[in-house]
Image (tube, coloured by chain):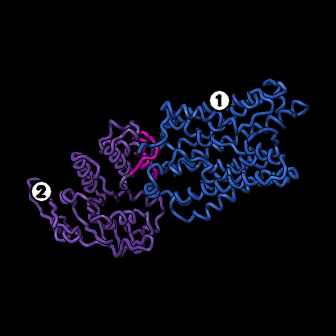
Chain colours: A blue, B purple
Amino acid sequence: MKAGGSSDAALSGALTIALLGAAVASMMIGPAGLGPAEILQGLLDGSGVQGLIIREIRLPRLILTLSVGFTLGLSGAVLQGLLRNPLAEPAVFGAPQAAALGAAILLYTGTADAFSWGLPLAAMTGAMASIALVWLVAGRMRNLVSLLLAGLAVASLAGAGTALTINLSPNPFAVMEIVFWLMGSFEDRSMRHVAISVPFMVMACLILLRMGRGLRALTLGEDVAVSLGINLAALRFIIVLAVAMGVGAGVAVSGAISFVGLIAPHLVRSFVKGDPARLLLPSALSGALLLLLSDMAVRLLPSASELKVGVLTVCLGVPFFLWLIASGRMRFGAQT
Amino acid sequence: MSVMLHLTSVAVALQNKQVLSGVSLHADTGAFIALVGPNGAGKTTLLRAIAGLLPCEGEILFGTEILREMKAIERARHIAFMPQNGVVAWPMPVRDVVAIGRLPHEGTAKAREDQLRVEQALHECGLDDLATQNSDYLSGGERVRVLLARSLAVDAPILLLDEPVASLDPAWQLAVMDLLAAQAKAGKVVICVLHDLALAMRYASRMIVMNHGQIIADGAPCSLVEELRTAFELDFDIAHTPHGPSLLAYRK
């Protein structure tokens, strides 16, 4: 039974329009002042300095921002639905932390510059390894709590590993590189970054967007979900794997960006009347919008060196989130 | 009358502990079975086994189909299960919660049929006025009725309920028991775990007494007083009232 079909379409439509507007605005931001007409020409034509700026600098940045934001927003909504917990986000299974560790190790060894695919590959390997470890330890157990605890433990381990890498780093440049990378940014990303990460994120999102039915059934608990014909083991396996793939690919090119996955579902939950299935697309779109606006802000705010978007999402997101909590405008979950 | 549900020597072991053994029962359409027994007797485990939520030995047949070999979605259309202490994880409107019960019919039933079943279930559970209310503003008893309506909305021929009336006030306890009796009369098999033996005796067409993971008695409610004494280690008297028999418990 489809509930709220037209209001959902309106919500997603409004978010998409806002995204398109923000996307155009974001293409206009930069040292070279370009208007909409020049952007369009640059996109179609691609020749000359303008074309180069549009196609090689601003477009990859835009694509990555949108895909990472979309993936994080969607992953957050899916994980909150799976765990039936408003605190869930991609970090609970340790994937972003492990991806960061993979990247940090590569930066530490100094081989990151040797070939440009190295960094994304190392990050994605880290994410996959963490999920594999979590699954190996707790995957066969039927309860979710052991999976969560294993995820938290692996996340802590990855965090400690990153700290250790920084600790043991032989030169200050490597430390700085690692620290900056950990802050998360879309600066100086190329089409090569797009090519290596976006296909994985698209694949993950296509899978995750189909999980709505199972998540809706899970609203009433695991027993009821199974009694309604949901294959819970398969649902969990697919979700954890797809989140690892999408988030791993995202973190691989953007560095660590936290908070988007946690906050995006809460921004739209009341619009979809709490339904975890109807939440998926709006949450993904608002994740993309949130990250895009943050990335525009870091380029607009005057500062000596460019601010890192991962820092800004938290700096701006947390006060806003705290205000939402304090104002009682948001109901996070059932009160029982 | 056709026999709808067969259980033959069903056994369940959880963490190497035998919680159910040698359970056999047959239920016809129209049966309203009260499943009673002391805490830990295996009542909930039996319901979960029938609902396909637990791996079990022995055989469970629905009509002529083997339950284990049925597709999950087929099983879901045939059996509705209402667990004890049900929760609604997100604040959703009551009508949307009830509509979750239509999930097994997605893609096969017409939208009109879905809507009809949901509205009917809302009405039967006295939720017409609460349909647009958010689930997290409900009282405990209202929430139970919402979850009961969700189970009814599945429109399955077998209805398994674990303590559906425990948190309801007396008026709603009677109303829900009437409702379940009507469901059975309409041709469903209703199996209901109850701790209120007086209610079980008044409403159920049949009582199954469980203890230590086994069925120790199965028959007309009034005929099982001796078995109840053994299972609960209590004394029971049947009081004959103008409204029918009632059961009173005493410590031995």
Q: Is residue A207 left or right of residue B252?
A: right
For disc 1, the chain is A
Q: In which image quadrant can residue B204 be found?
A: bottom left
Q: Mark 1 points at which residue?
A: A18
Helix, strand or loop for the magenta stretch, by majority: helix
Q: Is residue A203 above or below residue A47?
A: below
Magenta span: B86-105
- How much space separates mark 1 and mark 2, taking CA atoms? 67 Å
Is the same chain shared between marks 1 and 2? no
Give the percent coordinates (x, y) of residue A234. Answer: 56, 59
User: Would you say residue A238 is visible in this rendering?
Assistant: no
Front-most of residues A299 and B177: A299
Marker disc for residue B127? none
Which amino acid, by three-letter code, is at mark 2? Answer: Gly
- Residue drawn at 62 percent across, 49 percent down: A91
| CB atoms of marks 1 and 2 within 8 Å | no
Q: Is residue A3 left or right of residue A68?
A: left
Q: Name the residue under label 2.
A: B244
